[in-house]
Amino acid sequence: MALGEHEGHLGRVYDAKAPDQVAAVYDGWAETYDAEMARAGYRHPAVGLALLARHAPHGAGPVLDAGCGTGLLGDWLGILGFAPVEGLDISDGMLAIARRKGSYARLHHLALGTALPFADGAFTAVISTGVFTTGHVGAEGLPELARITRPGGVIVLTVKTTLWEQGLGSALAADPGLEIVEQTAPYVSMPGEAGTVPSLAMVALRH
């Protein structure tokens, strides 16, 4: 298998050409997603959570899990005292699983990269893991996340390195309202999945 190529649900996600196609693949994947990602050793949620806990005050809230999927982060955010936690995702099927877990104060069926129905500075922190990647969301998703993060708040993102190099890193650096305060070395998000392109994780402070 060539670098960056995947089979099964993951391959279909990366092959999707439009947001509605991405949503449809995730809808069909929702029931088995958690188990499959666990088998692949999925690291993004743990890495993102560690960075959030390092940079956001204990008990900070509200927090937005942007691209929450089945809610892998929801329980952990609650255990660490972040509250309330809201989530958004493009897939109704994934949101149904997240809702079943009961870890979120509110869930929203929304797509990153479009206008979001939240007030300026609505959230103390925003975390988005596994979303800024091939065929999903690029630099177009940043302005709204910055807008809805209050001054002094933080944004935690995991980003595919190819996306970072294709302009997302430059877009972050060029935004006078954001300051990158931490960035990890590249790492493989799914050690058990052949052909995974490395990612990095970063934290931006909202001025």
Image: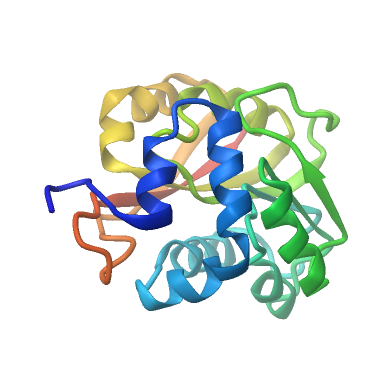
Query: Horizontal and vertical percent for residue 71?
Result: 67, 64
Image quadrant containing the C terminus = top right
Query: Horizontal and vertical percent for residue 43?
Result: 40, 67
Looking at the picture, tell me which residue is in the foreground, 120 or 111: 111
Looking at the picture, tell me which residue is in the foreground, 145 or 30: 30
Query: Horizontal and vertical percent for residue 105?
Result: 87, 60
For image coordinates 81% across by 44% down, the residue present is 108
* Residue 134 placement, left or right of 63: left
Report if residue 60 is visible in the image: no
Report if residue 203 is visible in the image: yes
Q: As drawn, which residue projects farthest toward the left?
A: 2
In which quadrant of the rendered view does residue 152 lie? top right
For image coordinates 35% across by 30% down, the residue present is 169
For image coordinates 19% across by 55% down, the residue present is 195
* Residue 110 placement, left or right of 164: right
In which quadrant of the rendered view does residue 52 lie? bottom right
